[in-house]
Image: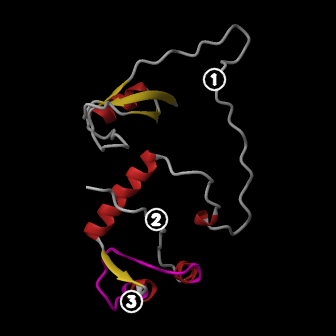
């Protein structure tokens, strides 16, 4: 994996952000195809910013070298979305991505409100047309849907972007 400091040239602000890629050729292919997107503004005019290399002294690891730590194994049967939320404010880039996701969901899916679990079951049984839906469901309703083989995902629902 290779780490790049990237810069968005789509706006006068020139947003900067990090990106990890398989190799430099993978970044080049994705960038030329317009598939590298600025997490702040969504622009695709993205290029690599000048970075200082981390060159270690002979026999010593680089000062900023990332040493992976083993993560504890999740308890058996733990659902992926049952992990506790991290503390602290949500980074602006993550908030912007979730706001764009919300716009796409609202544009392309039907809001069914508190009837989410019932409508998902009707679609699963073929009693209702299959389509994208979103709404509210309790933890127990979500678990029951999964037990019935119905795919359900939870998305952090952030307030919409202003303007």
Q: Residue 52, which numbered label?
A: none
Mark 2 residue crowding within 10 angstroms, few (<14) / some (14–19) / many (20+)? few
Distance (Cα) linking label 2 and label 1: 34 Å
Image coordinates of residue 69 in percent, x first then y, are: 71, 39
Residue at 53% over, 15% down:
53
The answer to which quarter of the image holds residue 30 is top left
* Tag shown at residue 64: 1
Spatial distance from mark 2 to mark 3, Cα to Cα?
Answer: 22 Å
Question: At x 68% / y 31%, what residue is drawn?
Answer: 67
Residue 101, placed above or below residue 9: below
The residue shown at (26%, 37%) is 33
What whole-number distance in Å separates the C-alpha atoms at marks 3 and 1? 54 Å
Q: Nearer the viewer, residue 13 or 105?
A: 13
Depth check: give the residue in front, 80 or 96.
96
Q: Pointer 1: residues within 10 angstroms few (<14), some, or many (20+)? A: few
Q: Sequence-wise, which precedes: disc 2 or disc 1?
A: 1
- Counting residues from the start of the chain, the first of labels 2 and 3 encountered is 3
Q: Residue furthest top?
A: 58
Image x and y of residue 95, in percent: 43, 52
What are the residue bounds of the magenta stretch? 121-140
Verify whether residue 110 appears in magenta. no
Left or right of residue 86, residue 76 in this image: right
Q: What residue sits right under mark 2 in the picture? A: 155
* In the displayed structure image, the side of residue 57 where residue 21 appears, left or right: left
Label number found at residue 122: 3
Q: Are marks 2 and 1 in contact (CB under 8 Å)?
A: no
């Amino acid at each position: 994996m290779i780490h790049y400091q990237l810069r968005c040239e789509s706006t006068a602000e020139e947003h900067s952000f990090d990106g990890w890629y398989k190799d430099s050729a993978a970044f080049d292919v994705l960038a030329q195809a317009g598939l590298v997107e600025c997490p702040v503004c969504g622009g695709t005019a993205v290029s690599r910013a000048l970075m200082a290399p981390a060159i270690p002294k002979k026999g010593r690891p680089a000062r900023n070298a990332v040493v992976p730590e083993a993560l504890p194994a999740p308890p058996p049967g733990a659902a992926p979305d049952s992990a506790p939320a991290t503390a602290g404010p949500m980074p602006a880039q993550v908030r912007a991505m979730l706001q764009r996701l919300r716009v796409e969901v609202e544009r392309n899916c039907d809001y069914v409100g508190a009837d989410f679990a019932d409508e998902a079951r009707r679609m699963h049984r073929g009693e209702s047309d299959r389509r994208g839906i979103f709404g509210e469901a309790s933890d127990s309703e979500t678990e029951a849907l999964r037990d019935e083989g119905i795919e359900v995902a939870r998305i952090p629902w952030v307030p919409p972007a202003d303007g």
